Amino acid sequence: VSRSKGLRGTESQREPRIPSQFSQEQRIAMKEALKGAIQIPTVSFSPKELNTTALAEFGEYIRKVFPTVFHTSFIRHEVVGNYSHLFTIKGSDPSMQPYMLLAHIDVVPAPDKGWDVPPFSGLERDGFIYGRGTLDNKNSLMAILQALELLLIRNYIPRRSFFIALGHDEEISGINGAQKISALLQARGVQLAFVVDEGSFILDGFIPYLKKPFAMVSVSEKGAINLMLQVNTTTGHSSAPPKETSIGILAAAVSRLEQTPMPNMFGSGPLMTAVEQLANEFPFPTNIVLNNLWLFRPLVSRLMERNYITNSLVRTTTALTMFNAGVKVNVIPPVAEAIINFRLHPAQTVQEVLKLAKDIVADDRVQFHVLDAFDPLPISPSDDQALGYQLLRQTIHSVFPEVNIVAPGTCIGNTDSRHYLNLTTGIYRFNPIYLQPQDFSSIHGINEKISVQAYETQVKFVFEFIQNGDTDEEPVPHLHEL
Ligand SMILES: CCCCCCCC/C=C\CCCCCCCC(=O)N[C@@H](CC(N)=O)C(=O)O
Ligand SMILES: [Zn+2]
Ligand SMILES: [Zn+2]
């Protein structure tokens, strides 16, 4: 199979390609720039609590670190929703449909406890830069601007226009950042060939028996429901308690939800395509099993449930995330509340999951309040005609020649890219970084870190990707071998 499958390779009328080699001085400057970004605590605590001082400082910081990006005549910079940033990079060929690169400025909170170094120190240790945002998602943000800065100082002029959108509230829904940028572009009549956001990686060690890492480009993402359950009862003196209290009723209800997983939906969508593409990478006899899913589907579907990450790919997950009740040690609690965070499998809808949850709770004393909810995202194309997917594939193979498989997947978390559905049918989520299960735990956890080498490679990836985006070739139809 040709590595360039899907994109024509002719080099007509191109500017000479700028090699992705950086001087020692540039390499030091790029890692120092990332450290500086980590040191600005752009924390989103809750929809009403953002560190606006840090967000404003971050805006100043990128102006200082990437001066060429901000002073190039064909780049327009706008601040949207007070703290988000939109860059419009005007290409020389208006007939080429633009695309968009996304990243976010905000991070989740990081209390010092458990960290080897303070989470907002950006300290370098043993070749790694530590800190909140080093994987989620200041690495992408800084790599995008850094790659563009490096291209510009080497006199790069893009042919295809593109946008860079940096949201400031991704961790708390994106409605003041990504959603506003999306509405602004829609009002301007922009339609995008594709967008690329965070949300997947080169996965290493996530699947038992699969020895080699593979690149997963997420072509969809799970839906979500935040459901508040509430039980109201009569309050009173705890010395003569009723048979059941609001706490007891609610605890039993949430326990039933936790003990009754949503149905296993393995059998369709991007996951099946990924399993088919990966089958031959497994040793005997797993390769035989995966190549014969018509026979072994029930077995594979059960095996997927065993591991909590692969389990999240085969079903709607149910996470009990908050529980509040009680006012005093000797008062019967008048109200108990819990929040359940569901992540919806692509084959289910919000309505279907709510109905299943009601049937599981099966207690009319428990009230259901949907705080927010959205269906799973549509599946973006990953065929030979899909420009965004093919450009990612081509760039992955050139920057990571050791990676054999690029497979479509579903993002288990949510990203700002879901706000751009109105502008494109091609939404791809991919971070050009190797990720192991312990790294996955560090995202929103402790000791989040990126190796200096991985960050340099991410800059190189974006540097190559932007140049690959200038291809005037439409993806070629796939020719089946005889
Ligand atoms: C056969 C394939 C095995 C695949 C294993 C999957 C391993 C998972 C790897 C990476 C997933 C990383 C997801 C990161 C994106 C999450 C972004 C995020 O945290 N979003 C928040 C906030 C929001 N926008 O809603 C969230 O709560 O989801
Ligand atoms: Zn993120
Ligand atoms: Zn996050």
Image (cartoon, rainbow, N blue to C red):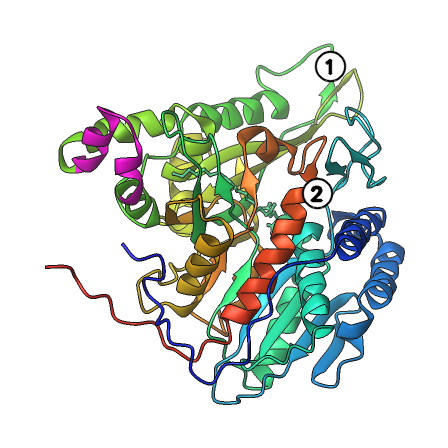
Task: Return the x and y of residue 250 as percentages of the image width and height.
Answer: 57, 27
Task: Return the x and y of residue 203 as percentages of the image width and height.
Answer: 48, 39
| Residue at screen point 63% across, 29% down | 233
- Three-letter amino acid code at disc 2? Val
Q: Earlier in the sequence, mark 2 or mark 1?
A: 1
| Residue at screen point 63% across, 44% down | 454
Relative horizontal placement of residue 383, taking residue 59 as reference (left or right):
left
The residue to which callout 2 is attached is 452
Main SS category, magenta section: helix
- Three-letter amino acid code at disc 1? Ser
Quadrant containing the N terminus in the rendered view:
bottom left
Looking at the rendering, the stretch of residues picked out in magenta corresponds to: 277-293
Helix, strand, or loop for circle 2?
helix
The residue to which callout 1 is attached is 238
Q: CA distance from mark 2 to mark 1?
A: 59 Å
Q: Which mark is residue 80?
A: none
User: In this orientation, which residue lies closer to the viewer: 108 or 201?
Assistant: 201
User: In this orientation, which residue lies closer to the viewer: 131 or 399?
Assistant: 399
